[in-house]
Image (cartoon, helix red, strand yellow):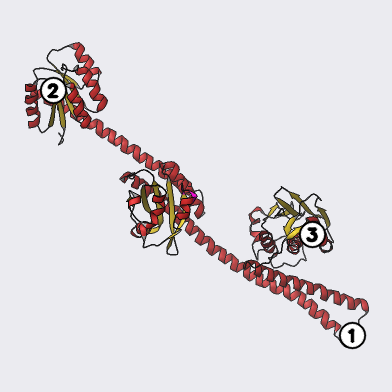
Amino acid sequence: MKANESILVVDDDLDFLQIISRVLGKKGYEVGTAPSAGEAISRLKERFYNAAILDISLPDANGTELLSRIIEIHPDIIAIMLTGHSSVQNAVESLNRGAFAYLEKPLDPKNLLSVISRGLEKQHLVMENRQLMEELERHNRITNTLLDVSQAVSQSLDLQKIIDSALDRVTKSTGLEVNFVYLNVNDHLLLKGHHGLSERIVQAMPKEVGKDSGVIGRIFGEAKPEIIEELAENGESDLGFLSHGGYNSFAGVPLTILGESLGVLGVATSFANYFSVNNIELLTGIGREIAIAVRNAQLYEEASSARALRELDSMRTEFLANVSHELRTPLAVIKGSANSLLQPDVIFDDQTRRDFLVSIDKDADTLTRLVEDLLMMSRLEAEALEVKKKSHKLAEVVESIKDRLDNLTAKHHLSVKIPDSAPPVAIDDGRISEVLTNLVENAVKFSDDNTTITIEAHTNGKEVILSVADEGVGILPELHQKIFERFFQGDGRKTGRRKGTGLGLAICRGIVEAHGGKIWVESEPSRGTKFSFSLPVD
């Protein structure tokens, strides 16, 4: 028998109540008595009794009717019916209504104690089984929630996507109204994501929290969960935005992995005294899953940055080599032609002299173009590119550089398809001319002679899309983004073409983006390439 097990005895025979109370008390039971059904109901509404011994005949109710009321109030109670007049019908009805046993008066105390003992044993088993089932269900809910969050955060290695997915899934899995994450960045806790907060409250949130101050800093520094009820009375400055927003309860857990704190997950609800030990256990598990995903993303980002730096260094080395070659080649031509013309003992005819001068002029233009590209790239990286926008028709812009494009495509077929109905765009026509020239020159470089290069335009109402398409070697899908990076150079140019500096497409992207547009490529190997860029309609 467990301590503090209680029994309520209901009988209108006061002498019987006194005797039975003494018998049960000696066995360690806590005994309550009631001489009527009404008083019994009052007592049962006030507290739980493990067992009830009921006389089947009471002055204000039938014992079987009282039995139904008692079981309705406390379904787990052990009810034992007593009668001075045995009746099979009463016995069957009592058992059908949920009585554990049906005994006749006068009672045999040993028999009563034995029945009570068996009934309480059954009750203990039922309650323990229910508790185990509830615990199992709770663990299943926790496991399913953690699995749900884990699946959400494992879909990406992008840190912001991980945070956003985690917070969205926490809301859906737990029903919590508000959640947010602060991460440690350069020894400061920065707000990295939030869910369920209005724009007004978000504006009031601290975007940066000290590691050694406030609730968020304390949770991070001590790596321990913390619950704050009655936020309005708390006075912690870094949580003031929650109380002002009408939230009453807050819980925060550290995002830790291998003993290292990465940040803090905070949750809040408008309900008072909401968070229990079980809530914190679940939130701690969620925080652990988020921490693992965050660390994986950080490691991936570090590895990617290191790899990108190595690639950039390699491209820069190759770029310097290419620039040296690009400078050296026209300089050699200019120097050689000039030296030849300066020979005092050689007399050249007019055509030869003209050929030398044309070579000097052409390669001087090449050097000028190379220097301009380098200066342009420098301005783009410093975000100092000057763009003077005016309203222009694209057909007029293309027409203004038609001679230049014809010279570039002398061995190709140039087709221009820009409808007169194309709306004007606000552009720096000189800069956009550079983009077109670069793209056409690129098309010439990577397509065979006698193939067609097409310049065309169309509008979707908000912007004009200008495209340059060729019938050349094409570009592998995995290179579609890399080709716009500075120093990157693709393979497949025609034999005899100079390698170049790898700045052309990077410059194009910079100029287009400075106009508020974007540039992209559509291409398949051996099926040609189409570069397109958008410009907002004026």
Which residue is depicted at the point 46% across and 45% down? Answer: 169
* Left or right placement of residue 256 versus residue 483 in this view: left
**Mark nearer the N terminus (2 vs 3):** 2
- Residue indicated by mark 2: 35
Give the CA separation, mark 2 to mark 1: 141 Å
Q: Give the range drawn in magenta.
A: 195-199
Which residue is depicted at the point 20% across and 27% down? Answer: 42
* The disc label shown at residue 397, or none: 3
Q: Can residue 75 be seen in this view?
A: no
**Which quadrant would the C terminus be assigned to in this image?**
bottom right
Give the CA separation, mark 1 to mark 3: 47 Å
Q: Are there few (<14), some (14-19), or many (20+) residues within 10 Å of tag 2?
A: some
User: Which residue type carries mark 3?
Assistant: Val
**Which quadrant would the N terminus be assigned to in this image?**
top left
- Residue indicated by mark 1: 346
**Mark nearer the N terminus (2 vs 1):** 2
The image quadrant of residue 53 is top left
Which residue is depicted at the point 76% across and 60% down? Answer: 436
The image quadrant of residue 186 is bottom left
Secondary structure at numbered mark 1: loop
